[in-house]
Image (spheres, rainbow, N blue to C red):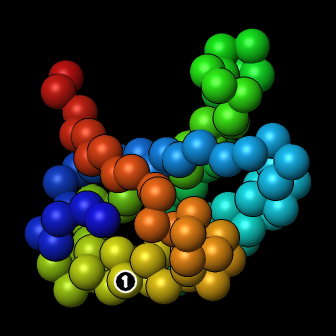
Amino acid sequence: MPPEHACEPGLTWFIYYRVDPSCEATVIEGARRLIALAAASCPGLHGQLMRRPAHDTPGGELTMMEIYRLPPTLDVLAVSSLRRTLEESANALLGPELARQRHVEVFEPCA
């Protein structure tokens, strides 16, 4: 998960993972619930779920991406709490195996 530090303006977490196409509907439902839960627990957070177009997917798996745009008002404790919420909720909503496969990238604006 992302590092535990105060939030810089514009900080965004990109969390991606691959899923079998037969699980797509279930994963989309779980990921949408996860994003909604995160947004409800963190005022000002904007979340989005995306997937790579099917024709760009190697090996037949779908690549899903959760995007979390964090509000600049988050302090260290709030970032830590959000991180824990996402970890615990991903286990419950996506299942432990898929939750472990999620890769996190943290980006900040440069302009």
Q: On the rendered structure, is 68 left or right of 84?
A: right
Write the residue at 63% across / 84% down: 92
Res 3 → quadrant? bottom left
Specify whether residue 42 is in view.
no
> Percent from the top left, x then y, of residue 65?
56, 44
Residue 108 in the image: above or below residue 84: above
> Percent from the top left, x then y, of residue 69?
42, 52
Residue 40 in the image: above or below residue 23: below
> Percent from the top left, x then y, of residue 109?
23, 33
Specify whether residue 84 is in view.
yes
The amino acid type of the residue labelled 1 equals Arg
Q: On the rendered structure, is 19 left or right of 108?
A: right
> Percent from the top left, x then y, of residue 62?
69, 36
Res 97 → quadrant? bottom right
Res 60 → quadrant? top right
> Which quarter of the rendering shows the C terminus?
top left
Residue wearing tag 1: 84
> Which quarter of the rendering shows the N terminus?
bottom left
Write the residue at 35% across / 52% down: 104
Question: Who is closer to the viewer here, 3 or 24?
Answer: 24
